[in-house]
Image: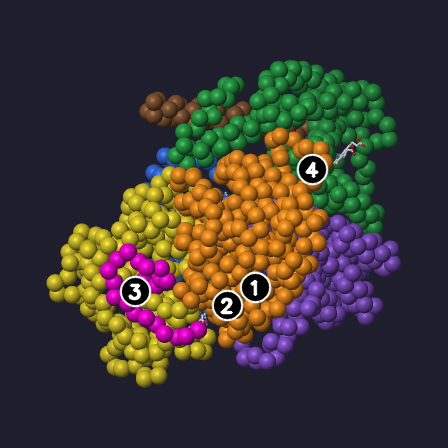
Chain colours: A green, B purple, C blue, D yellow, E orange, F brown
Amino acid sequence: MQNYANPTHFLRLVRVLLPVTAGLTTGLLAVGLYLALFVAPADYQQGETVRIMYLHVPSAWMAMFVYLVMTSAAIGTLVFRHPLADVAQKAAAPLGAAFTFLCLTTGSLWGKPEWGTWWVWDARLTSVLVLFLIYLGIIALWQVIEDPGKAARLVAIFTLVGAVNVPIIKFSVDWWHTLHQPASVFRMGGPTIAASMLWPLLIMAVGFTTLFLTLHMLAMRNEILRRRLRRLSMLAADGAAPLGVVAEPAE
Amino acid sequence: MSQKPQAEKRQAAIQTRRSPLAALLVRDLRIGRRIGGAVSMGVVFFLCLVTVTPFAVGPDQALLARIGPAILWIAALLATLLGLDRLFQADAEDGSLDLFLMSETPLELIVVVKCLGHWLLTGLPLVAASPIFGLMLGLEPAALARVTASLLAGTPALTLLGAVGAALTVSLRRGGLLLAVLILPLSVPVLIFGVAAAGDPVVGFKTPFLILCGLTLAAVALTPFAAAAALRHAGD
Amino acid sequence: MSQKPQAEKRQAAIQTRRSPLAALLVRDLRIGRRIGGAVSMGVVFFLCLVTVTPFAVGPDQALLARIGPAILWIAALLATLLGLDRLFQADAEDGSLDLFLMSETPLELIVVVKCLGHWLLTGLPLVAASPIFGLMLGLEPAALARVTASLLAGTPALTLLGAVGAALTVSLRRGGLLLAVLILPLSVPVLIFGVAAAGDPVVGFKTPFLILCGLTLAAVALTPFAAAAALRHAGD
Amino acid sequence: MQIEASALSVERGGRVIFAGLGFGLRAGEALLVKGPNGAGKSTLLRALAGLLPLASGDIRITPATEARLDHDDFGSIRSKIMNVIDFKGLERDSGEKPGSTFSPPALAELCHYIGHADALKPALTLAENLAFYAALLGGGEIAAALARLGLAGIADLPAAYLSAGQKRRAALARLVAVARPIWLLDEPLTALDTMSQTIVGELMREHLEMGGLIVAATHAPLPIAARDLVLGRPL
Amino acid sequence: MQIEASALSVERGGRVIFAGLGFGLRAGEALLVKGPNGAGKSTLLRALAGLLPLASGDIRITPATEARLDHDDFGSIRSKIMNVIDFKGLERDSGEKPGSTFSPPALAELCHYIGHADALKPALTLAENLAFYAALLGGGEIAAALARLGLAGIADLPAAYLSAGQKRRAALARLVAVARPIWLLDEPLTALDTMSQTIVGELMREHLEMGGLIVAATHAPLPIAARDLVLGRPL
Amino acid sequence: MNLAAPHSGFVIAAYAIAFVVIAAMVIGTLADYRSLKKSLERIAARARHIGDARS
Ligand code: HEM
Ligand SMILES: Nc1ncnc2c1ncn2[C@@H]1O[C@H](COP(=O)(O)OP(=O)(O)OP(=O)(O)O)[C@@H](O)[C@H]1O
Ligand SMILES: Nc1ncnc2c1ncn2[C@@H]1O[C@H](COP(=O)(O)OP(=O)(O)OP(=O)(O)O)[C@@H](O)[C@H]1O
Ligand SMILES: [Mg+2]
Ligand SMILES: [Mg+2]
């Protein structure tokens, strides 16, 4: 384990894993898309629009899963001071925001034909929106603080504060919703879901997960390189020859 | 500034014997009183919001009374945010924060006391003014009492949450907007239960008010650790 | 920040040939971008406010649509005020203001350019984003256009008025109080006509909008002199 | 070129800091303002820079007949000086004399003022900071200025990353980047290491040789020939 | 009492400022940190004060057996030192050794740190400022401290009204008002007039005689006997 | 998938947006990687240059 603290070892690991996850992702998404678009039946109520579910639900799951990943990375940063945890945190945030955005837009595109409006202030929708805002805050914090080490620690603290808050927000928003019982009468998700719809959904979900893992590894690799570059150009700015650069193994 | 060497010196001597936290509170209140700053800004901002809403909603008294608590709560939330970014920043810039870090007093307590000072300067005047503003919005006496009580119970939580944002943005010179962006999503629960306690006739007062108090207590218990941790790590 | 010595040096050389005012604008935009977040921060802040309001007011689409213009305008006011008190204070503290005073460029123009920078960083993104957020609040297309137009016409006035307050903050030790007490009430007319132009179906769009434009023009014509005068006396 | 100040007095926070102060300074001369802490050295410099109002007194700039000002760098400035013949402070008590023109910017535009604050924006790189001041104060070559003060290697670091002495040097680089005939320096050697102190000494000597004027406040000895002006306020 | 620092290294903004630095200091000894601008003097002092994290290295405080610490002023502190035996920095790269305790406040509480910023609130008077720090840092007699630094006459002025040297003296008055055994002084003589420089020199000598320790960074010579630690970063 | 169905436009739009977002993530990371590699190589070349000059 200690080995992977060393970025070079991690980069080597990435080189081994990357083809596997990338291949897996392509396969899963291809099969998933085929099943979702051509095999799965249209819903007897919703018609073709139900096919949006195969994007919407996996991205909703990913929105939460990525936050979970970031929370663990934040603990890694603050408690174990693992250098790779910083990198993992930073690389995950934009991906999480992208999946949340996808959940919001696909949901919105689903909502227009279903409810006749692009947006309602429904409990689940608003919780996701708040989660999206938290992601944006995290990204902004990353961008604004110069020193990567300091940024990592501060963002980790905020991520944990957010992690404590997200369940509270969810609970309050649900409570708020029951309080107001808005006019729109709809329920997301039926009680049961036919197997013919479940399989495409699960395959898409696994595909999204491997997609995230692949992109996360790539983004972490970028971040490691970015830090290396930063260090070297700092050395160069000091007028010293960046000797380390020759010693670093090429990718 | 007035020249009263005798009185001042005596006062200073008294202050020396004070506990660190009491001294900090006195200092912050004194600075707030002399400079003005965020204090008055909060209340006047509050007033602006209350003034402008009737123009937006139209002179429908019933409607105004219905969304009155919501307006007061949003105004309180926003007024708290104004100027909060300087809570620790001023201390960081002039080097006081270094000395806080080097004192024996735990930083967590220092954070709590600074929040208390800020709340006394901005939150409390706001709570005190809310019945008047509520009256302007045409709230019933019962509703007035509920709004005031809910603001009294809830605004400390807003300040404490804001303090986390202030600590996170302490090294950024224009952290105001970022602070708001970080903190607004987190303040959703306080807002929901605050407004509910203040004005919802269906649920009644007690349940949301108790939850609101619970949220504030949780904020008192947890946020100082987050803010102190952020302040410790921000020093570079 | 990326390290590109070559590019940077070339850029710096170009900047030397720039006019003082252009250089000032570039400087302020650059600082704004690096600190306190990118252009997008204002938009995100806006999004936060729009998200938070329904929790207070309730998810009633019709009501939200009705007070939508007010929400957008209040968000604009707040975004303008957040951090505006530091507009000249930061320059005064680090000594830049002394150098502004000693340059050949009239201080009035410097004030205008600093306000322009601030507006470009906070006001403009907000105006640009307002249609989307209006959509979320359920505004009609016609109302969307009105809100956007009124914000475009009115937010510069808010910034300029705030700048006078910011200049007073620098020159008077108790400036914070004055900023609030003088400037916020002055911004109430802007707010009222803005909201009226944005959403009042009775008055119509034209009259309040023209008044709003008049207010902005008056602000452009007058406030720089007031702010510059305050700054000149700040050097003590 | 010549500065003549007479009967200057300045009030700050309701107290008279000094009164009846006068001095004259010719092209190529330096004046060292000395005195204990709180004597009013910085106050005097700020008043000369036009940053503080004079309670009374006159500051007069006259172009010297034999001026060495035909040096290249000061070329554009010379023409400007021709217009600045008479600069009067606010004469609060005595009422304004008819015909006296009050134009503080005019004197200020001839001066460089290096105060206690370095006027650097932490978010900008050193080069960006200096380039901005060059543009604001009237153009100049910033690369050479940075090199002269030994900052070329760190020109692309944000100013927030600099040490105290590096920041001070960045402020002093303004003197080189923009040519102005009068230098008002408030404790210029603060935080500088010995090498930089030597460099700044050289800069000052060169400036004097070119016909510039220097008024400097400092507690440390400066490596230039200068007349002393001792301010006496005890505390 | 004794400080032993070994293999210190500090990173700031992603750059290694110094590495492998070590020194030892006994009761009554002073260490003068020297080096060109940007060498890392201030960084070292901040790291010792616990204000910057160590990238690696150890700072160890041991109570001296023959300690002269039984001086009155240090009475309460002595007992505290007994608990502070071992202070370790974060050892990121090498992994933490078992049993090492990380407690930065412990060392910090023994130190006075006078940095570049004076930590004065402009709105408060000098006496109020100092009284607050006395309360915060553990009590003391502020009137005597103000008198010692020649500030008694202006104790009731708001700090905003003070000159640079007066502000600096107000910061240094903390050293007298609150007794702490270790003084970390970053360019303590900046902006001071000659008389105040003498006074501060005396303070430092007295502190050393009482068994205190001093680590000072400065470009000017200090009027105390001290060992030198020269930091070598070229820029 | 029945393209003639009443709301198929929304389905297509959803899949198109998903495609765009995912493609943006992938292309963004890869482009970032490429530019970082390039900068690293440039700086390495400069280091070698300096090293040569010194020896
Ligand atoms: C922007 C709007 C929307 C957002 C933010 C949103 C968000 C979510 C979230 C967070 C989930 C959670 C999945 C889970 O609990 O495991 C979900 C699931 C789901 N959503 Fe949406 N949704 C939106 C619009 C819609 C619309 C318009 C429909 C269809 C009428 C819809 C149908 C579903 C279904 C069927 C599920 C699966 C439920 C389940 O598995 O329990 N959503 N959505
Ligand atoms: N906040 C910071 N972030 C990143 N780097 C910094 C920071 N402060 C200083 N540095 C860098 O650390 C190095 C050492 O700075 P330091 O302030 O310790 O120098 P110093 O020896 O005190 O110099 P001086 O004599 O000018 O005070 C400098 O090269 C500087 O660029
Ligand atoms: N902003 C101010 N408002 C009111 N009084 C001030 C202000 N600044 C300084 N003073 C007072 O003016 C007097 C002179 O201050 P000044 O800064 O000119 O002193 P100085 O000679 O530069 O001292 P030093 O050597 O400490 O820099 C001091 O007694 C001080 O208290
Ligand atoms: Mg001075
Ligand atoms: Mg230093």
Distance between the alpha carbons at the discs numbered 1 and 4 = 34 Å
The kind of residue tagged 1 is: Val
In the image, which is nearer the foreground, mark 4 or mark 3?
A: 4
Which quarter of the figure has residue B191? bottom right
Q: Are marks 1 and 3 on the same chain?
A: no
Q: Residue at x 67, y 73 (%)?
A: B14
Residue, disc 1: E176
Which x, y percent locates residue B138? Answer: 75, 69
Q: Is residue C22 magenta?
A: no
The kind of residue tagged 2 is: Leu
Q: Which residues are magenta?
A: D215-235
Q: Residue at x 41, y 65 (%)?
A: E193
Distance between the alpha carbons at the discs numbered 4 and 3 = 56 Å
Parent chain of label 1: E
Q: Is disc 4's CB within 8 Å of ligand 2?
A: no
Residue, disc 4: E100
Badge 1 vs badge 3, beta-carbon distance below 8 Å: no
In the displayed structure image, the side of residue D213 where residue C220 appears, left or right: right
Residue, disc 3: D32
Distance between the alpha carbons at the discs numbered 2 and 3 = 25 Å
Q: Is disc 2's CB within 8 Å of ligand 3?
A: no
> Which label belongs to residue E149?
2
Distance between the alpha carbons at the discs numbered 1 and 2 = 9 Å
Q: In this picture, is A141 found above or below B64?
A: above
The kind of residue tagged 4 is: Ser
